[in-house]
Image: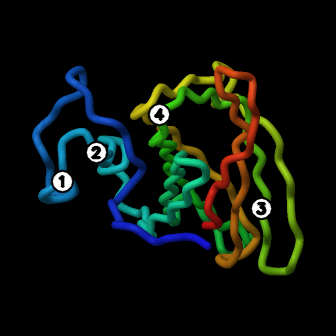
Amino acid sequence: GYVPVTTIAGPLRRRSPANDEELGANDPVGVSPDLLRPSPRARSRASALPMITYARTTRDITVRVQPIYLDAASNPVRQEFAFGYALRIENESNKEVQLLRRRWTIREKNGASNDRNGDTKLQAQPILKPGDTHVFDGSCTLASFVGSVEGTFLVRRPSGERFRVSIPSF
């Protein structure tokens, strides 16, 4: 199953010395500066409704996803419900791992499903050393307010071992 964790408003980004800013009104209070925080773009979107964050760990690789309903990009009359998401992959193992590709399954309320393999966000096939984090965001449009997205990442260890890391259903 999935594990709900703390909700943080808006798409997320990693803090680093290059983007170290003062905490704003939408930032989580009392958290370490190296945790994710809302991007300036997210703070400017007044019509985005944040949802709960979901997490799943596979072999010490944790994937956290925070979906967000994008009211301004949605059109319920035309049955277009836009959702964004911020996704964070944390290598909590003591071994390097390389992200190779992603597979999504998007399920609609009416039972229809859409499988998507690969994506441009992983073209560089990032390598996560122990303790590293990879963050990105994206979006999809559903035909109703009810639906789900889940999937896996195919990853590889330096030994050549490949395995799938689960993306929690959100």
Residue 21 versus residue 109 in the image, above or below = above
Q: Position of residue 10 (x, y in %)?
A: 38, 55
Residue shown at 39% from the left, 34% from the top: 131
For mark 2, what is the residue? Answer: 35
| Amino acid type, label 3 | Ile
For mark 1, what is the residue? Answer: 31
Q: Position of residue 80 (x, y in %)?
A: 70, 66
Mark sitting on residue 55: none
| Amino acid type, label 4 | Asn
Label 1, label 2: how far apart the Cα atoms are? 7 Å
Task: Judge the density around disc 3: few (<14), some (14-19), many (≥20) Cα neighbours within 10 Å.
Answer: many
Q: Position of residue 165 (x, y in %)?
A: 67, 48
Q: Secondary structure at mark 3?
A: strand
Quarter of the figure with residue 53: bottom left
Viewer-nearest of discs 4 and 2? 4
Q: Secondary structure at mark 1?
A: loop
Residue shown at 72% from the left, 50% from the top: 152
Q: Position of residue 109 (x, y in %)?
A: 78, 79
Among numbered discs 1 and 4, the one appearing first in the sequence: 1
The answer to which of 112 and 44 lies nearer the viewer is 112
Viewer-nearest of discs 1 and 3? 1
Task: Judge the density around disc 2: few (<14), some (14-19), many (≥20) Cα neighbours within 10 Å.
Answer: few
Label 4, label 2: how far apart the Cα atoms are? 20 Å
For mark 4, what is the residue? Answer: 94
Do residues under tags 1 and 2 come within 8 Å of each other at their CB atoms? yes
Task: Judge the density around disc 1: few (<14), some (14-19), many (≥20) Cα neighbours within 10 Å.
Answer: few
